[in-house]
Amino acid sequence: MRKLALEDEVLLQLDKPERYIGNEWNSVMKDPSSVDIRFAMCFPDVYEIGMSHLGIQILYDMFNRMPDVWCERVYSPWPDLDKIMRERHIPLFLLESQEPVKKVDFLGITLQYEMCYTNILQILDLSGIALLASDRNQADPFVIGGGPCTYNPEPIADFFDLFYIGEGETVYPQLLDLYRSWKKSGHGRTEFLRRAAGIPGIYVPSLYQVSYQENGTLASFWPVSEDVPAKVKKQIVMDFDGIPYPEKPVVPFIKATQDRVVMEIQRGCIRGCRFCQAGMVYRPLREKKVERLKKLAERMLANTGYEEISLTSLSSSDYLELDELLNHLIDICKPRGINISLPSLRIDSFSLDVMSKVQDVKKSSLTFAPEAGTQRMRDVINKGLTEEDIRMGAGQAFRGGWNKVKLYFMLGLPGETEEDIRGIAQLCETLAEDYYDIPKEERNGRVAITASTSFFVPKPFTPFQWASMNREQEFLDKAHLVKDTVRSMLNQKSIRYTYHDAGVSVLEGVLARGDRRISGVILQAYRNGALFDAWTEHYRADAWEEAFRSCGIDPYFYTARERSTEELLPWDFIDTGVSRKFLEREWERAKKGIITPNCRQQCSGCGCTQFRGGVCLEERLSGHQNIQS
Amino acid sequence: MVRVRIKFEKTGCMKFIGHLDVMRYFQKVLRRADIPVVLSEGFSPHMQMSFASPLGVGKTSSGEYFDVDLLEPASSEKLVRRMNEQMVEGMRVLSVKKVPADKANKCMTLTAAASYTVSLNPDRISIPDNLSTLAEGFLSQSEITVMRKTKRKEELTDIRPWIFSLTAKDTSLHMLLSSGSVHNLKPELVMEALASYGSFGLPEYSFRIHRNELYADKGTDGDVRLVPLEELGEEIV
C-alpha cells in the first residue's frame, strides 16, 4: 500500500482530506525505476477545480501512454493545508506517488485564468523550487507553462523556464526527445533551454530581452542570439480526429466541478465575437467525426461509471452533426439513467426540443448570452445574436414550459453608452412582458429572469486588445445604473440582477495585458499574502494595492489606456495564425459597428487558412471561393 | 428484481473518503461493472442504495454493508468478481447475498450492533499496563454514566447496557457495541469513559478505530442473539 505524504493526524484536520490522497479510479501508477522522465502536471487551483479541467486529462493520458514517462498530478493545497505545510516544512507532493514535486524532471503548470498567478508561486514555494527561473539550478525541474494565458506570458515570464504556446498534443514528444538526449549529455540547464527554443511553439523567456520607451510602452523585444527565433508560432492539431482522447479519465472521489464525462466535440469557433480570446486563438474550427464521438461516449461512460455526459466546445450548436450525435446519446443514455448536459447551445427550436428530452423542464433554467443590451452594442462586439433571436428563443421556451431564464451580459464594452447599459434592463423587461403575454393556461406560473453582468476585460489576440478598460468606479456606476433601471421596470419583481467584483476585474485586466514588469508585482502581492485570488473570500485587494505601490507601477497604465495600433504589444512576438492585420481590421469595424460574417458564411481572411484544415477547407469544398489570405 | 446485500471493506487511505462519496463511488462501480440496477421513478431516475451504517471519516472497516436492487440476478461469485475488477486499492467487495426485499429486512433497520477494534498508538498515549484488568473492572460497573450528545440535546446517559463486550489485548481493545437506529453507541465515547474510569489521558489522534462487523439482533423475548448482516442473506448460485 502507498505511504501517504501527510500523516493521518494532518489529513484528519483538513476540510477535505480526499483532495490529497490520490488513488482515484483511472489514476496511473508506474514504477519510478522503470521510467526516464517524470512529469508533474499542475493546475494551480484547488483539487475540485483542477480535476474538472479537460486539458490536464488530455495531457495526463498522452504522457502516460509513453512507456518511459510518468505523469502525475498536483493541485494547490487549500489554505488549511497550506498553513500546516509551511509550519511543518512539508514539501508539496504528487498525488500518485506521494513523493515531493521537486523530484520530477518537468513541472507543467496550466494557465487557465489570470487570477491563479499567485497560486503558481505557492506551488513553486511549497515544492521548494526557486520562484524566479533565473535562480534555479541543475537540481530543479524545468517549469513549463501552457494554456490560454500563455498567449501573453510576459507578466509571469520570470517564474517559468519555458512556455508551450498552442495545443499540448503537438510538440511535447519533440521536447521530451530533446530532454532525453540532453540528460545523457550532462550539459547545463541553459543548453537545454537554448535548444528547446528551437522547437516550434516553445518560448524560453530568458532568451529574449525587452526595452521600454520613455512613456512606458514597449520599445523593442528581441532574442539574445541568432539561433533563437524572433517569433514563436502557436502549435495546433490538424488531425483532430486522429489524436488520442482520454478514454479513461481520472474519476475523483469527491464531487468535482465537472462531475461527469466531458466529451470535446470540436475545437475552435466560427463566430468571431470580438471580445473572445478563445474564439480567436483556437482557430480554425475543427470537428471530430460523429462516428468517433459515438464510440468515445460509450467507452468513456463504461470506463468511468459517470451518470452524466457533457458535450464541450465553444459553441455546440455549430457542430454540423449535432442532431445525429444527440439522438444517439439519448438512445444509449436514457435507458441507463444517464443524463446529458448541453452547455453552449444556441436557443432555437431544435435545441429546445432536445433539451426538453434530456432535462426536467420544470427544474432547469435556460441560459442566453446576449453579452450586450442593445443591437448596436451587439454589432460592435460581433455577437451574431439579434433581439429577435433572443425573443423568439425565449418565447418558444416559455411555451415549452420553461419559466427560468438566465442572461449573461458584459459591462464596459468599447464604445458603450448609457443607452446600451439601460438596454440590459430593458431586454429583461421585454422578455418578462413577452412571458406574461402568453395566455395563463399556456405558461407555467411566474417567470424568473436572472441577469448577470461581468466587467469587460480586453484580452490579447482579440480585436479589442487595444481597447481601453473601465476603471473600478466606472464599472460600479454602470452596474448601479443597470440596477436602478431594473428597479424602474414594470416587471422588476421578476428580474434579479447580479454583478461581478469590479476590483478583481481591473486586476485581471492588468495581468491579461501586462508586460514583464508585472512579474515583480505578482511576486510582491504573493509575499503580502495574496493567494487564491479567484476566490472572492480569499481575494485580498490590500495585498495587491501595496504590491503595485511598492513596485511603483500604475495598474491603469495597463488597463485604462487605449493603445494605438502602432504600439508594440508585449505579446506581439507570438504568431497565433490570426494576423495582426485582421485584428486591426476587426477593431476598425467594431468602432463602426459593422458585423463580420462567421467562418461558415464567408471567409474573412484572418490568416488561419495557412493551417489547411478544419472549417477553412470545409468552405473550399462547398464551393465558396472567397478565401483571402 | 432481486435485492442484494453487498459487504465490503474500506482500508488504507480509503478511510479518508466520506460516506456520501463512498455511495457515489459504488454507484460508479456498479455502472462500470455493467450490473444493471433498478432506478427510481421520476424524470431523472437514479440509483437507490441503502447503507447499513455510515462510517465516519478516519475509520477503517472490514464489515460495511449496503443493499441495492438489481434488475436481473447473477451469481454471487460473478457479482463479487465483476465489482472487484472495478475497485481501487483499499476497497474490496467481500460478499454479495440475496436478501428479502421488504422494509423490515433493510440493512439499516436490521443493524443492532457493531464490533470494533480500537488500536492505541503508543507514540501518542501512555498505555496503562493493566489494560485488560482495567477493561474488566470498567465493565463490572453496574452503571456507566457519560455526557452524551444527541442531535437535539446533551444529557447524562448510562451506556453500560449498550456495551455487549469489551476486552483488551496488548495495545488494542475489542468492543461489541449497540449500534443502529435504536441505541447508537460510538467507540470514541466508550474510550472516553474508559479513560476517565482508568484515569489515563486520551490525547487527540491517539487511537485508530476499525469496524469489524455489523450485526442484526435475531434474539427473541429480550435475548440478544447477534448475527452478522451477511448471514441473513443467501448465496446466489
Image: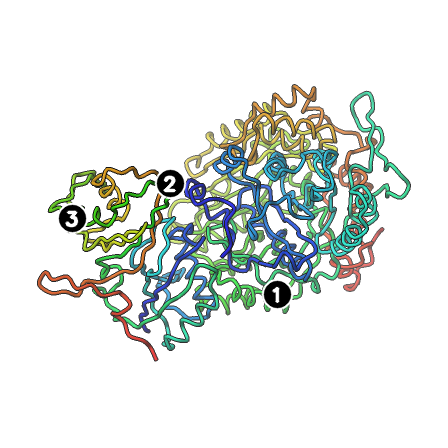
- Which of the numbered marks, if any, corresponds to residue A293? 1
Callout 1: residue from which chain?
A: A
Numbered label tally: 3
Judge the density around disc 1: few (<14), some (14-19), many (≥20) Cα neighbours within 10 Å. some
Same subunit under labels 1 and 3?
no
Q: Quadrant of the C terminus of chain B?
A: bottom left
Q: Which residue is mark 2?
A: B124
Q: Is residue A559 left or right of residue B2?
A: right
Judge the density around disc 3: few (<14), some (14-19), many (≥20) Cα neighbours within 10 Å. some
Real-space CA distance between mark 1 and mark 2, rounded to the nearest whole angstrom: 56 Å
Real-space CA distance between mark 1 and mark 3, rounded to the nearest whole angstrom: 62 Å
Q: Secondary structure at mark 1?
A: helix
Q: Is residue B162 left or right of residue A382?
A: left
Q: Nearer the viewer, residue A140 or A365?
A: A140
Q: Nearer the viewer, residue A362 or B87?
A: B87
Q: Is residue A356 left or right of residue B214?
A: right
Q: Which residue is mark 3?
A: B160
Q: Nearer the viewer, residue A207 or A553?
A: A207
**Amino acid type, mark 1:** Leu
Q: Nearer the viewer, residue B236 or A36?
A: A36
The label nearer to you, 1 versus 3, is 3
Q: Quadrant of the N terminus of chain B?
A: bottom left
Callout 2 touching callout 3 (CB < 8 Å):
no
Find residue A383 and report its horizontal and vertical position in percent.
65, 44
The label nearer to you, 1 versus 2, is 2
**Amino acid type, mark 2:** Arg
Q: Residue furthest right?
A: A226
Residue A212 to residue A38: above or below: above
